């Protein structure tokens, strides 16, 4: 068999290296202010090489957000008490997702109050985030997951952009306002 059988893997490794470099920049700067020049320098490649893997900044941002969304959602079910009622797992899943985003300096920069709400913009239009949220709600036994997932993503964006006083305050708000709408049977 002729050809470069490692070509696909090299593309994946190069793209990951670029995304890793971008992540380091996002951890120290508001994500909205990080440009392609800085990312290319941090990745140790030329702008031409960077654009070979990501056609523009939006494509790079989207790839980064999707990679991190998979990371946040992966194992979410395993970190939650499977024996707990679905209403408890819903709130625990939201709280855990918020915690994971906030603990990551790179991800939390997407919700910096001093910049345009790039994290909210990306999350709202991301099919990956919507799909992962729908799958989570479906696993909780909910119906109408398309509508509920869209709404839940907006709730998460709101709490990341305008946090409650503390984790207890946010949990109370989620239980009082989100839970009745997401899971009427859990009231």
Image: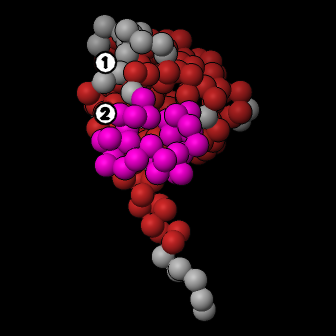
94 up-or-down from 24: above or below: above
Viewer-side residue, 178 vs 158: 158
Image location (x, y in percent) of residue 143: 71, 35
Q: Quadrant of residue 142?
A: top right
Q: Residue at x 37, y 16 (%)?
A: 112
Crowding around mark 1 (Cα neighbors within 10 Å: few <14, some 14 to 19, many 20+) is few
Residue labelled with disc 1: 167
Image location (x, y in percent) of residue 130: 62, 36
Viewer-side residue, 113 vs 144: 113
Q: Residue at x 52, y 45 (%)?
A: 51
Is residue 133 visible in this depiction of the protein? no
In which quadrant will I find the N terminus?
bottom right
Disc 1 versus disc 2: distance between alpha carbons?
27 Å
Viewer-side residue, 5 vs 107: 5
Viewer-side residue, 118 vs 3: 3
Does the magenta portion include 8? no
Find numbered disc 2 in the image and state the secondary structure of the residue it sits on.
Answer: helix
Q: Residue at x 62, y 18 (%)?
A: 181
Give the mark nearest the N terminus, 1 or 2: 2
Question: In this rendering, would 153 be left or right of 92?
Answer: right
53 up-or-down from 123: above or below: below
Magenta-highlighted residues:
35-62
Residue 156 image label: none
Residue labelled with disc 2: 25
Image location (x, y in percent) of residue 121: 56, 22
Q: Residue at x 52, y 51 (%)?
A: 53
Find numbered disc 1 in the image and state the secondary structure of the residue it sits on.
Answer: helix
Crowding around mark 2 (Cα neighbors within 10 Å: few <14, some 14 to 19, many 20+) is many
């Amino acid at each position: 068999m002729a050809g470069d059988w490692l070509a696909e893997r090299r593309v994946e490794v190069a793209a990951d290296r670029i995304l890793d470099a971008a992540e380091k920049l996002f951890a120290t700067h508001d994500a909205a202010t990080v440009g392609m020049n800085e990312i290319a320098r941090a990745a140790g490649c030329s702008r031409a090489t960077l654009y070979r893997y990501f056609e523009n900044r939006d494509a790079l941002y989207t790839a980064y957000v999707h990679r991190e969304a998979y990371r946040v959602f992966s194992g979410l079910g395993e970190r939650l008490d499977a024996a707990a009622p679905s209403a408890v797992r819903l709130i625990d899943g939201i709280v855990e997702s918020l915690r994971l985003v906030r603990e990551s300096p790179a991800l939390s920069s997407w919700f910096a109050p001093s910049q345009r709400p790039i994290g909210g913009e990306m999350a709202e239009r991301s099919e990956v985030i919507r799909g992962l949220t729908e799958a989570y709600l479906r696993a909780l036994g909910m119906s109408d997951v398309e509508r509920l997932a869209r709404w839940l993503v907006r709730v998460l964006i709101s709490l990341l952009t305008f946090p409650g006083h503390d984790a207890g305050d946010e949990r109370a708000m989620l239980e009082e306002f989100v839970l009745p709408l997401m899971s009427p049977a859990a009231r």
